[in-house]
Amino acid sequence: MTTLSKPLIIKSVVINSAAILLIYFTPALSHLLNFPLYLIEPMRLMLILAMVHSNRSNAYLLAITLPLFSFAVSGHPVFFKMLLITTELTLNVWLFFLLSHKIKSIFTAMLLSVILSKIAYYSLKAGLISFAVIGPGLFSTPVLIQIITTLIFSTYTFLILGKKSN
């Protein structure tokens, strides 16, 4: 069993606390700012911060618990969509750590992990829509915004982890 360093524990606690607060206050902040914050993918944002600044275990913890926490405190997303988001975020973590060991470019590893996890999400969501398990509407966030956020997240990962690997 490995022991975690004190700085890593502190980083994880700060990231997890910020993640929970962001998810908890997203509806209120969206109303206050008159901007739908879900468009910037707050769960994925916090997940990527965890992958970059803490460790794999903490990233998995957030991938599993953030959608569950959001569902528990607000009823949103609906249950089956919460399961989809949990699957997508967990797959994102797994793919990133897998690809970052197989691909030299950390930017490409993050980019592919996000894209592949989104493909899985939308494939599963289309299936649930076709069986009328969830309501219609495959894309709630415009694809262009998803492309932009994916590029921003991948660039951020490269800027932080790319320096560490050199």
Image (cartoon, rainbow, N blue to C red):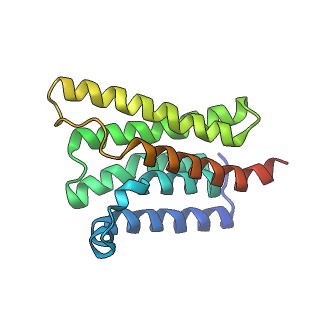
Q: Is residue 30 above or below residue 39?
A: below
Q: Residue 121, position in %: x, y?
A: 38, 33
Please state which of residues 4 and 98 is positioned toward the viewer in this rendering. 98
Q: Quadrant location of the N terminus?
A: top right
Residue furthest bottom as drawn: 32
Please state which of residues 140 and 54 is positioned toward the viewer in this rendering. 140
- Residue at position x 44%, y 44% from top? 144
- Residue at position x 68%, y 42% from top? 107
- Residue at position x 21%, y 29% from top? 129
What number of labels is visible? 0
Q: Is residue 165 left or right of residue 134?
A: right
Q: Is residue 96 above or below residue 65?
A: above
Q: Is residue 138 left or right of residue 22?
A: left
- Residue at position x 33%, y 37% from top? 84
Please state which of residues 57 and 149 is positioned toward the viewer in this rendering. 149
Q: Residue 47, position in %: x, y?
A: 50, 52
Residue furthest front as drawn: 144
Q: Quadrant of residue 36?
A: bottom left
Q: Residue 37, position in %: x, y?
A: 36, 62
Q: Residue 116, position in %: x, y?
A: 50, 31
Residue furthest right as drawn: 166
Q: Quadrant of residue 22?
A: bottom left
Please state which of residues 13 and 86 is positioned toward the viewer in this rendering. 86
